[in-house]
Image (tube, rainbow, N blue to C red):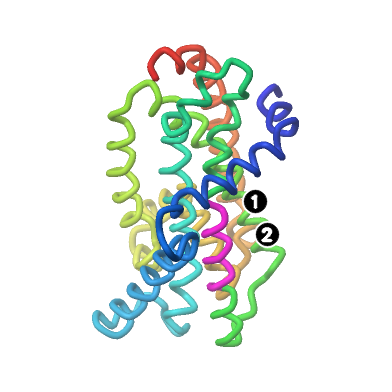
Amino acid sequence: MEFIKILIKNKKLAFSLGKNDFKNRFANTSLGSIWGFLQPFVFMITYVIVFQYILKTGSAGSDPYVVWFLPGMAMWQCINDTIINASSSIRTYSYLVKKVVFPVDIIPIISIIASSFVALFLFIVAIAVGILFNYIPNFIQVIYIIISAYAFFIAFTRFTSALTTLVPDFSQLLGIMMQLFFWFTPVVWNLSMLENHPTILAIMKCLPFNYLVTGFRDCFISSNIVTENNWIYTIVFWIITIIMFIWGNYIFKKSKKDFADVL
């Protein structure tokens, strides 16, 4: 496929620009890129304190709350930051779009790479805390879930980056939608709360965000998201991702000739 060929051909350029993108986000601060890691880390720890010690939630069941919570929140932070940044990336890099020779297709990938530095840090924090509490993750499953997440990001942002470029108001709508998805995805609450509502539970398990958040959490404390009783949801996830990529790729290819004009 054309997009895959362009990405492989320009992989070094995309990684270089992605690294520079991350550095430039904090270029005017004395601590520089440290803020990129510090802000989400403090945010996650604050949630642990509030939900475990103030609200005293029982979402984790018999497992330590911090081990249950951190993997899910780390994955959500990765999902949210990557989608928001990649969706607005073409407008952010409008000066590159106007260069005839620049491969516009890789621009969302640049933002995905830039967001990956913080995501990797948060994943390492979650793994370290899990090991500290003697919850050794299934590293094969960890690798699978991360690959699945980035496949979904590429598929999803092929569509949202094109739409945000053509319709700027969509970026505001996307921000609202991601806030709603946060609360409808079992990041701070447990799917077991829906056991008395099997239809709703089945629908929730089919949603890609839920699959990724629950899948990364299950690397530490539960069953294998790929096999056992969950294989049907793995198939659903990949069907949704593939359809979304085909559709998003079609929209992107059809729209990119208009990017320079609207920017």
- Would residue 92 be seen by someone viewing this image from the given angle? yes
- From the viewer's perspective, tell me whether residue 147 is left or right of residue 68: right
| Up/down of 262 relative to 205, above or below | above
Could you tell me residue 107's position as x and y percent?
Answer: 55, 32
Residue drawn at x 41%, y 54% as measured from the top left: 28
Query: What amino acid is labelled 1 in the image?
Result: Ile
User: In the depicted view, which residue is nearer to us: 43 or 64?
Assistant: 43
Quarter of the image for the N terminus: give it. top right
Identify the residue at horizontal 39%, vertical 70% (top origin): 44
Which label sits on residue 232? none
Question: Tag 2: Cα neighbours inside 10 Å, few (<14), some, or many (≥20)?
Answer: few
Main secondary structure along the magenta-highlighted residues: helix
* Residue 186 horizontal/vertical position (percent): 39, 61
Label 2 element class: helix
Q: Which residue is mark 1?
A: 147
- Say if residue 73 shows up in the picture: no
Residue depicted at x 58% and y 86%: 132
Residue type at tag 2:
Ile
Residue 260 vs residue 220, the one in the foreground: 260
Quickly name the residue at label 2: 143
Do tag 1 and tag 2 residues touch (Cβ < 8 Å)? yes
Query: Gap in Å between the C-alphas at discs 1 and 2?
Result: 6 Å
Give x and y (percent) for residue 138: 67, 70
Q: Is residue 86 above or below residue 65?
A: above
* The magenta segment: 115-126
Examine the rendered structure and indicate whether residue 130 appears above or below residue 86: below
Task: Answer left or right for 139 relative to 62.
Answer: right
Label count reads 2
